[in-house]
Amino acid sequence: MKFYLDTDIFLAGFKDKDHLKLSAQKFLKDNTGKHEFFTSTATLLEIWHYLNRNNLKEKTLEAVRYVEEIVDEVISLEPETLIEAVSLAEAYSLSPTDAIHAIHAKKFDAIISTDNAFDRVPNLKKIDFSQSSD
């Protein structure tokens, strides 16, 4: 299967302390090699923003490398995706980045995330890595 990985699984796995750290690590360990993983440049931007906001700028390149080691491909954000995301955000009360992730994720078998916002998006299967026994 092909999975789109949301930002939260990377942050949970990368941060020194996170209540979802073990769940993120277990999901990735159990599914690496069995499935293909994808994410987007929006994920990298969210991670950079998080690190910058939390005075952890020096960890940005390490975090980007962490993501690159996990995924098979980082998808670029194209203008067409942004246009679709604006409509999706308005229709389902999503943040701009959640809308971008949802548009990308619809092209895959599921989005891997704990974010309940994705439950509002029709035709988008979500796997909550904190609940997964895979």
Image (spheres, grey):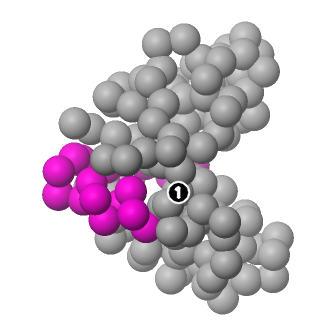
Image coordinates of residue 64 in percent, x first then y, are 49, 71
Report the residue at 26% width, 38% height from top: 2
- Between 6 and 87, the residue placed more toward the observer is 6
How many other residues sit within 10 Å of disc 1, few (<14), some (14-19) or many (≥20)? many
Report the residue at 51% width, 26% height from top: 103
61 lies above or below 112: below
Image coordinates of residue 82 in percent, x first then y, are 60, 29
Residue 6 in view (yes/no): no
Residue corresponding to mark 1: 9
40 left or right, relative to 32: right
Q: Quadrant of the N terminus?
A: top left
Query: Residue at the front extreme?
Result: 133
Report the residue at 76% width, 74% height from top: 52
Amino acid of disc 1: Ile
34 left or right, relative to 22: left
Whether the magenta-drawn stretch holds residue 40 is answered as yes
Magenta stretch: give its range. 25-43
Query: Residue at the left extreme?
Result: 33
- Between 1 and 80, the residue placed more toward the observer is 1
Whether the magenta-drawn stretch holds residue 51 is answered as no
122 lies above or below 134: above
4 lies above or below 66: above
